[in-house]
Image (cartoon, helix red, strand yellow):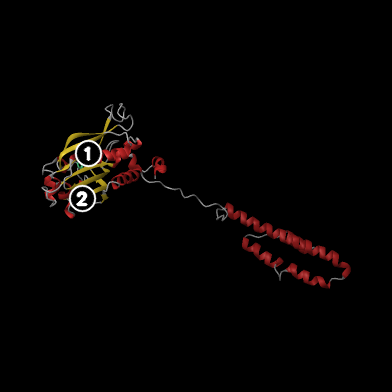
Amino acid sequence: KDLLEEVKGLTAETAEEAEQLRIKYLSKKGIIPSLFNEFKSVPNDQKKAVGQAINELKNTAQESINNLKEQFEQSNLTSGASDLTLPGSQMPIGSRHPLSIVRKQIVDIFDRIGFTVAEGPEIEDDWHVFEALNFPPEHPARDMQDTFFINQDPDILLRTHTSSVQIRTMENQQPPIRAIFPGRVFRNEAISARAHCIFHQVEGLYIDEDVSFADLRQTLLYFAKEMFGKETRIRLRPSYFPFTEPSAEMDISCTLCGGEGCNICKYTGWVEILGCGMVDPAVLSNCNIDPEKYTGFAFGMGIERIAMLKYQINDIRLFFENDVRFLEQFKAES
Ligand code: PHE
């Protein structure tokens, strides 16, 4: 009877103590099993009563010790210890950046007509960014205003266009050359909805015997249709770059209104997407390629510009803020 009262009133401060109690009362050599051993010596007429008492004692002890243990398990949960039965936390799946998506589309389109891909350094020298490309010494593009120089050294700079990779490629390889050069470029410009000091270009270069302006036009028409849809038309307007002659800027029929007139094309029906032209013979000579034997074309486009048209994005800064609410919208595309 005393034992019964004792086990009813068991307390423990820790799970460890509760376990000690279980060992004391219920384990093989504990108090209660040893009572069962003594049961043999109980006189027959008392066996029934004593048996019931011991059983009750055992059940009661089991119950109170289990209760104690449960209580510690519960307080473990509420005090923040691991609950191993909880499902794991979700690892959100990311998406490709829209500029990576568009760059890949451009690379794939030119890959299908035999253009390889190459890259060049972002930190360049004056020769590859300007001089070999026929920029006269006083050309405004060399100005401090546009170009980021490194340590004030006029010969170490961040490239302002990917045309520098044309030079590096032609210096290292004789024609035929048919390649595109994607990469990051830098200009010291005020940041606005339309301009950024860092952006991306894809340069194209094709040098071989008898490459003509018609080849340039047809290549760019193919690109425009693949990129913006089969109904897309192109228009070449005369322009000027020091490293191409003749030079042109290419417009495509507006991706939104198809030429009817809307906000995107400023009611002209056309939007400019790239600069291009026939590689100037002086540039070929600068790279030790014989301009009497070879001709070629080059073009350069801004990836941001293409992406903005394709996805109707009205602010270039969105590409660099990495706001997931913006990035998430391209999940299906990646
Ligand atoms: N490099 C020129 C620019 O950044 C684009 C261009 C590339 C023009 C190749 C003609 C040929 O504006």
Which quadrant of the rendered structure holds the N terminus? Answer: bottom right
Residue position marked by numbered label 1 in the rendering:
217
State whether residue 129 is above or below residue 59: above
What secondary structure is marked by label 1? helix
- On residue 177, the disc is 2
What's under tag 2, amino acid-wise?
A: Ile
State whether residue 156 is above or below residue 24: above
What's under tag 1, amino acid-wise?
A: Arg
Q: Residue at x 39, y 40 (%)?
A: 326
- On residue 42, the disc is none
Residue positioned most to the front: 210
Is residue 219 among the parts visible in the rendering? Answer: yes
The one nearer the camera, 300 or 40, is 300
Are the two marked residues, 2 and 1, in contact with CB atoms closer than 8 angstroms? Answer: no
The one nearer the camera, 33 or 3, is 33
The one nearer the camera, 272 or 220, is 220
Side (left or right) of 316 relative to 131:
right
Which quadrant of the rendered structure holds the C terminus? Answer: top left
Measured from the top left, where is residue 203 in percent x and y? 24, 45
What secondary structure is marked by label 2? strand
Tell whether circle 1 marks a residue whose Cβ is less than 8 angstroms from ligand 1: no
The quadrant in which residue 277 appears is: top left
Side (left or right) of 321 relative to 84:
left
